[in-house]
Amino acid sequence: MRKERAWREASRVFDERAAEYDSWFEGSLLFDIELAALQELNTPLSGPKLEIGVGPGRFAEALGAEFGIDPAFAPLALAKKRGVHVCRAAGEALPYAGKSMGTVLLLFTYCFLADPLPVLQECRRVLAPGGNLVLGIIAAGSPWGRMLQKKKEEGHPFYRSARFYGPAEVESTLVGCGFVVKERRSGLLQQPEALKEMERSRAGLVSQAGFAVLVAGVAR
């Protein structure tokens, strides 16, 4: 019951404040840097592509994701206008056939999951042979992670239900769910108070980088 309440609380906030959240992306250097890190991945990402926690569809549109699900209704209307085929659903029960997706995107959603395991199991179920899960997180312990943790503790509406993870912990969970990590990439190398210019991401997991990306395939 506690996990379900946390899930519903996080969903309700993004439902009620969808327009406010969507407007944050306009002219955002932070969004541009995070998107660039994803676009700079070396692993080929085949279609069809599905984003779990698609929100208003900004990343889905930029990355060519045809499908998106979210438990919050209002953001889905915005994603639909951006050309994404949307469905109101939870990551624990994806409304797609097994082995039907070439790529699953789980971007900035992992921290809001009451329990990541069933969601990762569903990702594995819907991935086609040779497909990839792209998981992006704000790294706990980094300056960016500490900033968001402080916002959570102060009751920020978007982060009060979040739990932040380190890349090593997430990778361990992926392996435990039957994935093998193929690529690691780091972005947000500037500190929050010093974010001033566009930057290139780096291969591997860079200590204190704010944005960590893991690309994983289903282990054979």
Image (cartoon, rainbow, N blue to C red):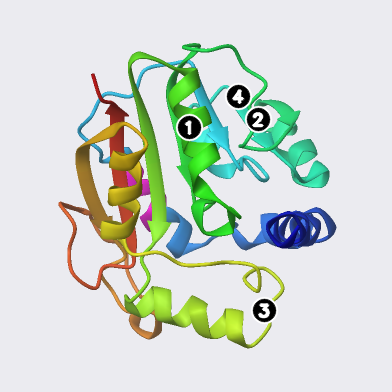
Amino acid at dot 3 = His
Q: Which mark is residue 194?
A: none
- Sequence-wise first label, 2 or 1: 2
- Sequence-wise first label, 3 or 4: 4
Check disc 4: other Cα within 10 Å, few if <14, some if 14-19, many if 20+. Answer: many
Label 3 vs label 4: CA separation?
Answer: 29 Å
- What residue is drawn where x is 54% and y is 34%? 51
Label 2 vs label 4: CA separation?
Answer: 15 Å
- What residue is drawn where x is 77% and y is 55%? 8
Q: Position of residue 179 (x, y in %)?
A: 30, 33
Label 3 vs label 2: CA separation?
Answer: 28 Å
Check disc 1: other Cα within 10 Å, few if <14, some if 14-19, many if 20+. Answer: some
Q: Looking at the rendering, in which quadrant would you find the N terminus?
A: bottom right
Residue named by callout 2:
93
- Sequence-wise first label, 1 or 4: 4
Element marked by disc 3:
loop
Q: Which residues are magenta?
A: 33-38
Residue named by callout 3:
156
Q: Looking at the rendering, in which quadrant would you find the C terminus?
A: top left
Residue named by callout 1:
121
Label 2 vs label 1: CA separation?
Answer: 10 Å
For residue 63, side relative to residue 185 (left or right)? right
| Location of residue 97 with respect to 138 vertically, above or below | above
Amino acid at dot 2 = Ala
Residue named by callout 4:
67
For residue 113, side relative to residue 144 (left or right)? right
Amino acid at dot 4 = Phe
| Location of residue 83 with respect to 140 vertically, above or below | above
Front position among marks 1 and 4: 1
